[in-house]
Image (tube, rainbow, N blue to C red):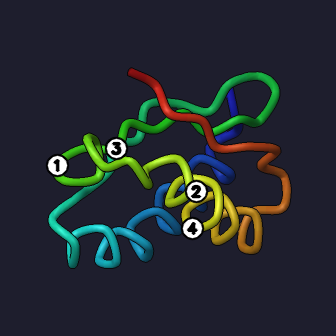
Amino acid sequence: MADEALLAKVKETLEAFRPQLRADGGDMEFISIDSDNKVHLRLTGACGDCPMAMMTLKMGVERYLKETCPEITEVVQDE
């Protein structure tokens, strides 16, 4: 499990990104940070069924998150 400071920073960063998803009718749910510093999310709403969801996750959320939290190694979608 990630330390509390990293967890707080990740959640704050995700909140800052969330309006971009909501603008397209989607959202995301934070699940966890694992021992490898991978962030587990679930895309919901329009983003959950979108064929571009993986690109949004990797090129959007992951890139933004790694810029603010370099300890994060990857963002993965949980079903």
Q: Kindly report which numbered mark, 2 or 3, lies closer to the viewer in this rendering.
A: 3
Q: Amino acid at mark 4?
A: Gly
| Location of mark 3 (residue) | 43
Asked if labels 1 and 3 touch by Cβ distance under 8 angstroms, the answer is yes
What is the secondary structure assignment of the residue under circle 1? strand
Rounded to the nearest angstrom, the CA distance separating label 3 from label 4 is: 12 Å
| Inter-mark Cα distance, 4 to 1 | 17 Å
Which residue has dot 1 on it? 45
Which of the two residues, 74 or 7, is positioned nearer the viewer here?
A: 74
Distance between mark 2 and mark 3 Cα atoms: 16 Å
Q: Residue at x 53, y 53 (%)?
A: 57
Residue 31, picture quadrant: top left
55 and 35: which is toward the camera? 55
Q: From the top left corner, tell me how far across and down residue 43 is, in percent.
A: 34, 44
- Crowd class of label 1 (few under 14; some 14 to 19; many from 20; radius 10 Å): some
Q: Amino acid at mark 3?
A: Leu
- Depicted 48 relative to depicted 15: above or below: above
Q: Quadrant of the C terminus?
A: top left
Name which residue type carries label 2.
Answer: Val
